Image (cartoon, rainbow, N blue to C red):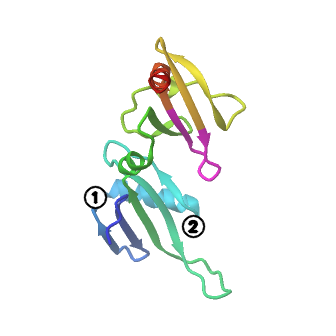
Amino acid sequence: GEEPYVYSIQIMDAKGNEHEGGNILRMDTVRKDHILSVAAEGKGENRWMYPDSNDPALIATREIRSFHKTNFDLDYLGTLVIRINIEKLVRDIAPEEGDVMIVSDGHVIYPSEPTIDASRIAKPMRATKGYEIQNIDDERYFIAQIQSLNTGWTYLNITQFNQIFDQIVFIKE
């Protein structure tokens, strides 16, 4: 069946053949070489490539290596490329209130066009999770964050403080 969060899956084998399914984005040689290079750096581990102006997908890529029973020869067989619809994924699972932002090493993974510049958000020095109120552009924001131990990505929920206050007043009435 169709996976709602996967644009496409591609395998580029060691002989240069391509096997693909889904909503394929044709890649030029430069892009393909870059993906193969990123996958090779991982030596079989998963590597992430972030959306950019040429491709809105979050890409998971890794080399496929061989092994037979207890013989781990790890010969290169090809490269797996999975293009993920990060916009739809976050839109479907994120809370409706506030803005969700996913960042990694100062790079915004989601959204493609953030409403707040990630560099304006002061990250607590000691915390990998928690919340605080920050002033950004003369507005008060409630910012909740958690960092993934798997990817190192930081997930932020950014809500204007007055929105929270308005909801509390509404509930009390």
For the point 59% across and 50% down, which residue is it?
Answer: 151
Q: Position of residue 127 (x, y in %)?
A: 69, 34
Identify the residue under disc 1.
Answer: 25
Q: CA distance from mark 2 to mark 1?
A: 23 Å
Q: Which residue is mark 2?
A: 44
Rendered position, 98 above or below 22: above
Residue drawn 35% across the image and 54% down it: 30
Q: Looking at this rendering, what residue extends furthest in the bottom direction?
A: 69
Q: Is 164 or 79 nearer to us in this picture?
A: 164
In terms of depth relative to the viewer, which is nearer, 158 or 108? Answer: 158
The C terminus - image quarter: top left
- Where is residue 23 shown, x and y percent of the image? 27, 62
- Outermost residue to the top: 138
Specify which label sits upstream in the sequence, 2 or 1: 1
Q: Is residue 110 magenta?
A: no
Identify residue type, mark 1: Leu
